[in-house]
Image (cartoon, grey):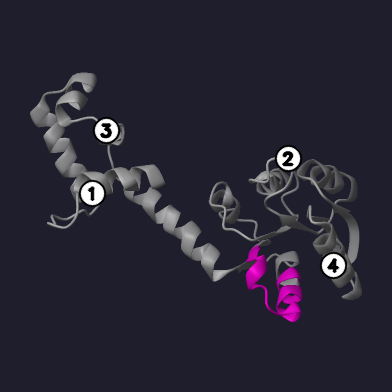
């Protein structure tokens, strides 16, 4: 396969290049920034991009955003993300791509070179390879979002007011509702989020936490 590597750590970048080359792949570019990745993909049209998620200048999600951009511009390009962390933002959208050819591995959990090369081959062939921890965290986020999807627009407004620390009386004033109506919306929110009455928990706090995590 024709492969582009995007990894800011020089030793790891060179190690990946040597490993993939020795395994018979053609590494057409090995770069250290997200912008350089986009340029390399445009210039070389690789079959696969092996991408670190946290790259210069902010070391947050530059690589991930670049990977999303690559798939948007060249849908057939396989993407194998490598990271020390699970970054939820944008990941669910990338994994939802029906085109296949997506992988997400955690660097510290890649214990066998053969397994890594197998993942490269599977992703390059259009398959999907995900570390179990990535599945747990990203799908957990999706499930939380799905729970909020059942709320009506007015219930979301009430929940947003709760997240701002407002009382039912304050929410009623802002939304121009009666306080009894707000109480009914709050009760409905608890039901839809499956927050049951429990002496040891505060359903209002749990509802807000679910809202913020979404």
Q: Does the rendering let one see residue 214?
A: no
Q: Is residue 7 left or right of residue 180?
A: right
Please name the residue shown 65% across and 56% down the image. 99
Closer to us: 164 or 130: 164
User: What crowding class fits label 3: few (fewer than 14 Cα within 10 Å), some (14-19), or many (20 or more)?
Assistant: some
Mark 2 or mark 4, earlier in chain: 4
Query: Are circles 2 and 1 on residues that touch, CB within 8 Å?
Result: no
Mark 1 or mark 4, earlier in chain: 4
Mark 1 or mark 3, earlier in chain: 3
Q: Nearer the viewer, mark 2 or mark 1?
A: 2
User: What crowding class fits label 2: few (fewer than 14 Cα within 10 Å), some (14-19), or many (20 or more)?
Assistant: few
Tag 1 residue: 192
Tag 4 residue: 15
The answer to whether residue 138 is above or below residue 35 is: below
Please name the residue shown 79% across and 56% down the image. 9
The answer to whether residue 211 is above or below residue 77 is: above
The part of the image, by quadrant, that contains residue 153 is top left
Q: Position of residue 165 (x, y in %)?
A: 26, 33
> Where is the N terminus found, in terms of image quarters?
bottom right
Tag 2 residue: 57
Residue at mark 1 to residue at mark 3: CA–CA distance: 20 Å
Mark 3 or mark 2, earlier in chain: 2
Q: Position of residue 156 (x, y in %)?
A: 30, 35
The part of the image, by quadrant, that contains residue 198 is bottom left
Residue at mark 3 to residue at mark 4: CA–CA distance: 51 Å
Please name the residue shown 11% across and 24% down the image. 178
Region of the chain picked out in magenta, as a range: 104-120
Tag 3 residue: 165
Q: Secondary structure at mark 2?
A: loop
Residue 69 part of the magenta segment: no
Q: Position of residue 155 (x, y in %)?
A: 25, 35
């Amino acid at each position: 396969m024709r492969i582009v590597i995007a990894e800011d750590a020089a030793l790891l970048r060179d190690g990946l290049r040597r490993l993939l080359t020795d395994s018979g792949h053609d590494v057409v570019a090995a770069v250290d920034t997200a912008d350089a990745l986009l340029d390399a993909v445009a210039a070389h049209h690789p079959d696969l991009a092996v991408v670190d998620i946290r790259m210069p200048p902010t070391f947050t999600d530059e690589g991930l955003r670049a990977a999303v951009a690559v798939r948007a511009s060249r849908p057939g390009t396989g993407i194998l993300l490598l990271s020390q962390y699970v970054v939820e933002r944008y990941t669910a959208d990338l994994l939802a791509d029906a085109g296949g050819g997506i992988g997400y591995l955690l660097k510290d959990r890649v214990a066998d070179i053969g397994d890594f090369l197998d993942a490269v081959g599977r992703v390059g062939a259009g398959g999907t390879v995900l570390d179990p921890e990535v599945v747990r965290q990203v799908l957990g986020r999706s499930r939380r979002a799905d729970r909020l999807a059942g709320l009506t627009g007015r219930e979301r407004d009430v929940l947003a007011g709760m997240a701002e620390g407002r009382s039912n009386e304050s929410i009623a004033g802002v939304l121009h509702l009666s306080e009894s109506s707000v109480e009914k919306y709050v009760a409905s929110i608890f039901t839809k989020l499956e927050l049951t009455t429990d002496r040891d928990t505060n359903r209002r706090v749990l509802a807000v936490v679910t809202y913020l995590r979404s």
